[in-house]
Amino acid sequence: MSFGTPSVTTVLGAEDIQRAVTRIAHEVVERSKGAADLVLLGIPTRGVPLAQRLAERLAAIDPAFDPATAVGELDVTMYRDDLHRNPTRALGVTHLPAAGIDGKIVVLVDDVLYSGRTIRAALDAISGLGRPRAVRLACLVDRGHRELPIRPDFVGKNLPTSTSERVQVRLTEVDGGADSVSIRGRADDAGRDGAEQ
Amino acid sequence: MKHLLAAHDLSLDEAILILDTASQMAATQSREIKKLPTLRGRTVVNLFFEDSTRTRISFETAAKRLSADVINFSAKGSSVSKGESLKDTALTLHAMGADAVVVRHWASGAPYQLAHAGWLDAAVLNAGDGTHAHPTQALLDAFTIRRHLVGRRGGRRGGRHGGAGGDGVGADLKGLRIAIVGDVLHSRVARSNVRLLHTLGAEVTLVAPPTLLPIGIEAWPCATSYDLDETLARWHPDAVMMLRVQRERMSGGAGAFFPSPLEYARRYGLDQRRLALLPEHAIVLHPGPMNRGLEISAAAADSPRSVIVEQVANGVAVRMAALYLLLAGGSSAEGTL
Amino acid sequence: MPAYLLKDVSPLGESPVDVLLADGVIGALGAPGTVDAPAGAVVVDAAEHVLLPGLVDLHTHLREPGREDTETVESGTRAAAAGGFTAVHAMANTSPVADTAGVVEQVWRLGQEAGWVDVHPVGAVTVGLDGERLSELGAMAESKARVRVFSDDGKCVHDPVLMRRALEYVKAFDGVVAQHAQEPRLTEGAQMHEGIVSAQIGLAGWPAVAEEAIIARDVLLAEHVGSRLHVCHLSTRGSVEIVRWAKARGIDVTAEVTPHHLVLTDELARGYDPAFKVNPPLRTADDVAAVREGLADGTIDIVATDHAPHAREDKDCEWGAAAFGMTGLETALGVVQQTMVDTGRLTWADVARVLSAAPARIGRIDEHHGRPIAVGEPANLVLVDPAATRAVDGGAQQTASANTPFQGRELPGRVVATFLRGRATVLGGTPVPAEGAG
């Protein structure tokens, strides 16, 4: 346990993140044998720009994939199981592609996978929106400590952490500046920001 | 953000938060599955001391779409025939474990008392009290106006998501002109709308005969006019809201506020001719229920400019937003929404 | 009944003297140390205290007969004594209404038996307060209650012909009609003062003109028939100006203001707390300023409490369902001291005038009450400690009801002792029941 200023360790820099997204894009295409019927749904806040970047990579790999019609946003606030434990959360936008998700392969995109509860809420949200053929999960970082039987299909980096640490993701589109993923080692830090999971 | 008692209590940011939340709620209501699990396990009581099927159903729908349990309590009694006291009713609801009480009451100030008297600690939503306030009506009116008109004359842009803010999300109503026509004196809808529209940056003109404008209205943040034709022709409102007129007010003998329904309709009714004076983009609102042929002609009510039916749908979304914002989060913060 | 020697007391706030009360009158009065106390006399150290003639309330609601759940003659007069009063006029809107000799004699007798103050029943102007025909004013005047003040208070004598008849008729026995000025048609369903606040908070308004128009009519009627008129609980600037004009014309009109109208405004209605619901309603700050000026310059002759006790369930509810009225017997002197004496608008001698001498004269009981503090006068007196302060607690008052707008408010002054014909009804700030009294 450290005292004084919290220790901050950068575990992924901008280039690492870029490579990770590219690799995930290839894995996604490989797994679904092409990009047809794929729909990416980014989970706010930082899952949204990640989904957009992933979509651009997919389009570069398979021109049949059109980011304009196959990317959306899925706000899970109304399906969370911890609403009552926190101050009221503002709702985010849910925006599906015009063709919907019935029969599609939906890939949920989020920055950090932790307890799995956000994804559980996302699955509930999806059940109210349509019936995909399959739902897969892509995350930039898996930091372990699952509380539910949820596992990712595509991972940028596996990052073992202790529960006392906080994982902070910074993306240019949301935070300005350079992309980074860092770990803060302060033991008693109880605050939550959008990136900590 | 514990209660929603009056539009007067809402800051600009709070008002926009409710409207934006209502946008997201409205989006869910166009899906096949309209139900969300968000308020599962919460109990919402509709406590109506005044008959109102429409508003009650709207709140009931809103609560049920969020998976809350709904109990309808139709309380008897009036200023003349006293039923069970407000206090005893409140204590009963507290014992029953109500998380939120939606209250409509004939006495101005009753929701305020419920919220502050210490009889219960549920969230209190005012569904209309006497001639004082009807905040959710004003919110759904503002929501409807924003949806149709933002982008016309300014309005703050740049929603939270940095996008087009389609639907007006993130925006206020700055620069818009709204005319509210009818019995202002007895109207809680008018009071709440004047307050909320002002907070959102719109300009309001109240149009009514002198007998139906209250003493003290000079202190309100709006203009007044006795002449509907002049207001429509010269001021070019972007939206016209017609208030319901009660026929009883015209037949009270010496105390009648207006000589006859016919004279009222002639001077203050929205008919085809007046409809044509409106700018092309202008919309027509009415809180309902309408007196077709009195304050609004059938043609005006059914015209393409009328958004009256849409107001009803928006009412559900706005009430879902209000219930969400009051009930979903932890009860750490005190005060009214 | 023991004698009382009040030492070092300031009569009407003037230089200290010793005063001896014996055999029901002021027996002796002299420089401090020069008055001997007879054996058995109770000596009261009254240094820094003010001695006033016992207060006289021209406008109280004792609620008996009919609403003994809210107040009885016994509890109400005990509250009056605690507030420094030695005489009260009990309004007629009881159940049954005090419109016959029988009812007024009953109330008078109850007052006698309780023994706290002299109760002078007010007779209703119209039968059943219906405003349709005169009640037997003469019979009430001749009864043991010797009624001289007549009022339909609670309601207005609004019919102009009826008011004319009443004003004329009472001349025969030196009576006075005390009008509750409220044009009923202009105030149907009214809840509070009609103004900026009522428009904002959505409560039906009670316009000032509904009071002023009646007063204007009544002073002209009184002038025309040569009768005297008393205006109850005047509350607006316009009313003060009309009375001032009438007096300048030589019209025999007197006017009263309540303590609450001297200090509270309609802004208090914003919280919808029925503790502030009263008739006539609390008005604007400008009206409060006007009635204070009127009281200071004599346009308003007296302060009267309009003490109106109400059951808890009639105040612990929505504003629209709540009863109008506030208790006031035990807070009147403190409010007058706070708003008028401590601010320099009135002296203690003025207080004696507006709370004792003038109401006694209007009610024609000035042979016994509101007398000068001099040897030989009846010992109807109140001893006040002006330096003490207390926080008002509605539930702790002597009155049987708790509805007060001053809950929690710090008021100056404390009634230390009240004497009714030389007998202490209050001593050491506490009521003292009469021997053998009911």
Image (spheres, rainbow, N blue to C red):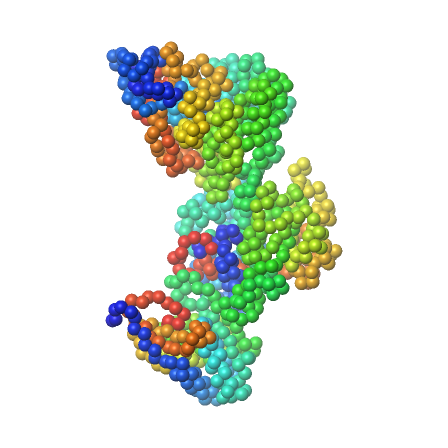
Q: Position of residue B264 (x, y in %)?
A: 70, 47
Is residue B194 in sight in this rendering? yes
Q: Residue at x 58, y 59 (%)?
A: B174
Camera-side residue: A53 or C36? C36
Q: Quadrant of residue C69?
A: top left
Is residue B245 in sight in this rendering? no
Q: Position of residue C5 (x, y in %)?
A: 30, 16
For residue C185, above or below residue A29? above
Classify residue B147 as left or right of residue B254. Answer: left
Q: Quadrant of residue C76?
A: top left
Classify residue C168 as left or right of residue C420. Answer: right
Q: Quadrant of the N terminus of chain A?
A: bottom left
For residue B138, above or below residue C63? below
Q: Position of residue B173 (x, y in %)?
A: 58, 60
Q: Residue at x 37, y 73 (%)?
A: A168
* Figure disc tally: 0
For residue C189, above or below residue A15? above
Camera-side residue: C74 or C355? C355
Q: Residue at x 30, y 23 (%)?
A: C47
Q: Position of residue A160 (x, y in %)?
A: 31, 78
Classify residue B151 as left or right of residue B87. Answer: right
For residue A126, above or below residue C191? below
Q: Quadrant of the C terminus of chain A?
A: bottom left
Task: Identify the residue at the far right of this view.
Answer: B273
Q: Residue at x 62, y 26 (%)?
A: C217
